[in-house]
Amino acid sequence: MRPSLIIGNWKMHGSLDSVRQLLTAILAQSESMASSTRIGVCPSFVHLPLAREILSGSSVSLGAQNAHAEEQGAYTGEVAAGMLAEMGLDYVLVGHSERRQLFAESDAEVAAKFLAVQKHGMQPVLCLGESLAEREKGISSEVVLGQLNAVIEAAGIEAFARAVIAYEPVWAIGTGKTASPEQAQEIHAAIRQRLAEKDAEIAANTLLLYGGSVKSGNAVELFSQADIDGGLVGGASLAADEFIAICNSAD
């Protein structure tokens, strides 16, 4: 049976004081959680050192929201995967819809970041998702599987033994809208089937997360679906009580 994984993506939120308070509250409340549920948080780059200090010795994993594919160079404002690895991070998000949309990241760039993150011993959380226009055209699976195929072709199916996949419909991120459990399960099942076409064992063991306005009120139904192994949680992860309630929904 696959474990559950809940990752909080804090995006461009937080201050030194609020990060300290939030992590302290998460640590205090996570002690009573089921051991089969894993928790991770992805603060901003500038808050990673503080988060690492607070989380040291705990069961809460630490991740980053992005990484550059190159080892080093004249890339002002970017952070290389090797730099993040030196901080002892567990996860790095790659291909988040906001990166694809706002920063025009291509499938090829996402695949390169995926490879860079793995090269340095961290697990990429590969984000996949379609826009509202694409869903209304009935091509959700085609779009999502196309994004997945780009990484499979670049990294090989074996790479997914050390990766997590998060399906996040773009139209449900930060909008308050959520894919129904049935809609989410349909895409998750298609993702797992595509992996299974390459390697059944890897497909059976790869964690698939749902992201897109996950809240404590809808988490139980979402996480009860056969192919949904947890969540990539945005705004709701900025409140400790709500985040832990979501995590408890995965039991």
Image (cartoon, rainbow, N blue to C red):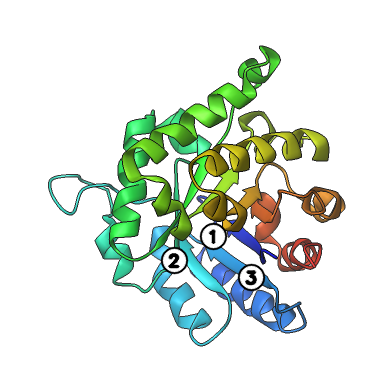
Q: Which of marks 1 and 3 is nearer the N terminus?
A: 1
Q: Which residue is drawn at 79% across and 48% down?
A: 225
Whether 97 is drawn above or below 32: the answer is above
Q: In which quarter of the image is the N terminus?
A: bottom right
Marks 3,2: beta carbons within 8 A: no
Is residue 88 something that shows in the picture?
Answer: yes
Q: Mark 3 points at which residue?
A: 38
Q: Residue 114: where, in percent of width, then height?
A: 37, 48
Identify the residue at image location x=77%, y=83%: 32
The image shows residue 33 at horizontal and vertical percentages of 75, 78
Mark toward the viewer: 3 or 2: 3
Q: Which residue lies furthest to the bottom in this view?
A: 57
Residue under label 1: 14
Whether residues under marks 1 and 2 lie with C-beta atoms below 8 angstroms apart, the answer is: yes
Q: Mark 2 points at which residue?
A: 47
- In the displayed structure, would residue 246 be above or below residue 187? below
Q: In this view, does 155 lie to the left or right of 59?
A: left
How far apart are the two marked residues, 3 and 2, measured between alpha carbons? 21 Å
In the image, taking residue 212 as reference, residue 249 lies left or right, namely right
Residue 105 appears in the rendering: no
Mark closest to the chain's N terminus, 1 or 2:
1
Pointers 1 and 3 in contact (C-beta within 8 Å): no
Q: How far apart are marks 1 and 2 (CA)?
A: 8 Å
Q: Is residue 189 above or below residue 158?
A: above
Quarter of the image where one finds residue 250: bottom right
Q: Going from the N terminus, do you reach mark 3 or mark 2 first?
A: 3
Residue 35 placement, left or right of 111: right
In the drawing, what numbered circle is on residue 71? Answer: none
| Residue type for callout 3 | Arg
Q: Where is residue 206 in the image (x, y as percent from the top left)?
A: 57, 55
